[in-house]
Amino acid sequence: MPIRRLDPLLVDRIAAGEVVERPASAVKELVENALDAGATRIDVAVEQGGKSLIRVIDDGSGMDARDLALAIERHATSKIPDGDLTAIATLGFRGEALPSIAAVADLTIETRAMGAPHGCSIRVDAGEKRGLSASNWPRGTKIEARALFAATPARLKFLKTERTETAAIVDVVKRLAMAHPQARFSLSADSGALFDYPPCGDDSARRIFQILGEEFAANAFRLEAERDGVRLSGLAGLPTYSRGNAQMQYVYVNGRPVRDKLFAGAIRAAYLDFLSSDRHPVAALFIDCDPRSVDVNVHPAKAEVRFADPGLVRGLVVGALKQALAEKSHRSADTSARAAIDALARGNGAQYRAPPPANWSLPRSPYAPAGFEESAQAAFDAGAPMADARAHDAPAQEPESPLGAARAQLHETYIIAQTQDGLVIVDQHAAHERIVYEKLKRQREETGVARQMLLIPAVVELDESRMNALAPALDELAAFGLALETFGPGAMLVRETPALLGEVDCKRLVEDIADLLAEEGDARGLSRRLDHVLATCACHHSVRAGRRLSAPEMNALLREMETTPGAGQCNHGRPTYIELKLADIEKLFGRR
């Protein structure tokens, strides 16, 4: 078949496939245009997941007839006046959004420029222009895209369900709304209004809480950092307030929402000590920098960026998050405590509010236990603990400590401690796991992890891939406290192990480390994997659930938690303790 030029309309439809991938892509482009026009109110409405209708109304600057006629032409834009792509200050800049949507939908635009005597409108049906006409539209711009992808049935065929497409639109509008608190955003669908965020002025935190909820507000900390002209601000969640995916990570560069591997990796690295690989933190991060130091023209959807100095930006994000986590991670997310209170409140006991008679006493009760004596009751009133692991010898000042004084151990797993204004329930294994991990890290950084020499070196046989992963890392593993030597073509000799771990299953430990190192071979990856190895070892060699602790042991654990970084959660992101305030407990019993 001979080479021939494609029909211009077909060219437009092919190009539109890069810009308008799904209904959410069209919504994103239209809302960005509204923001670039200075809109302070943006109303979005969709039907059938955006397939049958997308409507965006704004109160921005609008367009006159000349601009409207050019707006639907490819590569016509007002956003690069000097043709300089090195200093883009707007969300849009390519001049492709409206012509791309017009090529695959029935597009109608009504608009009115500020100060114009009347508005104007235009319609483009699957790339065919219907001409300009006068309009009585009062202010700003209204854009309607109907029958999206009707002209390209192949694309329509591969769209997801209506519910999924609507969810993608919700996510797109929320991401844009978060970065522009000065504007009001509303979104409605077939089922009715989905959200309506009032303007927040310059209070970006308020807009973040509007979108992520008050629960995030109670479990987040602020970030403020700057380095070499690059500024980072925003909010991040406590490790115990994590999610099963990264959907609730919002990152912006000069107000532009991005999904970039640089930031995903930086956030993951910062939380590496606090979360397992299947958990993801919640964060809203804003990077502000000179537009000339970042290239936004690297992806059709403008979702990725390239920095002149990516190491600087990554270091700023990782450093700021790590510093904030070190200061704040002694806190445990209060969602666990709220859940406990709610669960108790739903119990049958919480429904009963009748107080006992004023003259009631246990000795006169028909349900009094046999052999009840006043002397026994006196001992109980004096505060004698009723658990096997007693804490009566705890120092008197310990309830004044943040985690209080141990009073009992339940099921050989949970420590109950009394604080000045409530009680704390501690998961002894999770708490000790964090303590052991931090000790191992501190030893490695200061003097190297203390080692214990094996009386009889252990020989561990490995396959070729594991041997290749371990061989380059022997020196780094020695700093970790694990001394290995090659022992023939398919084996490693274990001479020393970290002393803090006590008795170790050498075969399992070496195999696990080899598997971890095989995933990443660079130095930075090796450092992360060694931290992962430390965390794994700490988990396997901490105080296990089911071990009975004495009162001094329980109090010693509480005191160590108070001085250990990140003690609010274990290495997997689970809370190490739950704090219940006395006021909440009193509400359960109808005292408040």
Image (cartoon, rainbow, N blue to C red):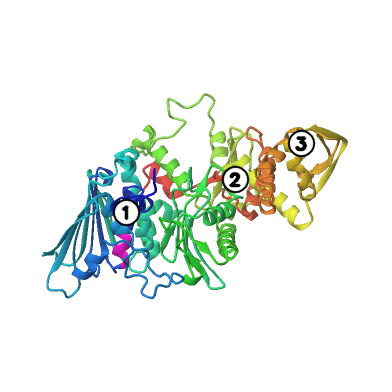
Label 2 vs 1, first from the N-terminus: 1
The 10 Å Cα crowd at callout 3, few under 14, some 14 to 19, many 20 or more, is some
Q: Where is residue 418 in the image (x, y as percent from the top left)?
A: 55, 47
In the rendered image, the quadrant that contains the N terminus is top left
Residue at numbered disc 2: 570
Of tags 3 and 1, the one toward the viewer is 1
How far is mark 2 from mark 1, CA to CA? 54 Å
Q: Foreground: 126 or 547?
A: 126
Residue 554: quadrant of the picture:
top right
Q: In terms of depth relative to the viewer, which is nearer, 135 or 114?
A: 135
The amino acid on which the numbered mark 1 sits, given as a three-letter code, is Asp
**For the residue carrying disc 2, how many other residues have a C-alpha within 10 Å: few (<14), some (14-19), or many (20+)?**
many
Q: Element under label 2? A: loop
Q: Which mark is residue 576?
A: none
In terms of sequence position, does the residue under pointer 3 or pointer 2 come before the other? 3
Front-most of residues 207 and 8: 8
Look at mark 3 in the image and give the residue it sits on: 504
Q: Nearer the viewer, residue 527 or 305?
A: 305
Under circle 3, the secondary element is loop
Q: Name the residue carrying label 1.
A: 12
The range drawn in magenta is: 31-36
**Amino acid marked by disc 2:** Cys
When asked about the image quadrant of residue 329, the answer is bottom right
Is residue 74 highlighted in magenta?
no
The image shows residue 68 at horizontal and vertical percentages of 22, 66
Circle 1: element type: helix
Q: In the rendered view, tell whether residue 23 sits above or below residue 504.
A: below
| Residue 565, above or below 379 | below
| Amino acid carrying mark 3 in the image | Val
> Between marks 3 and 1, how big is the CA–CA gap?
65 Å
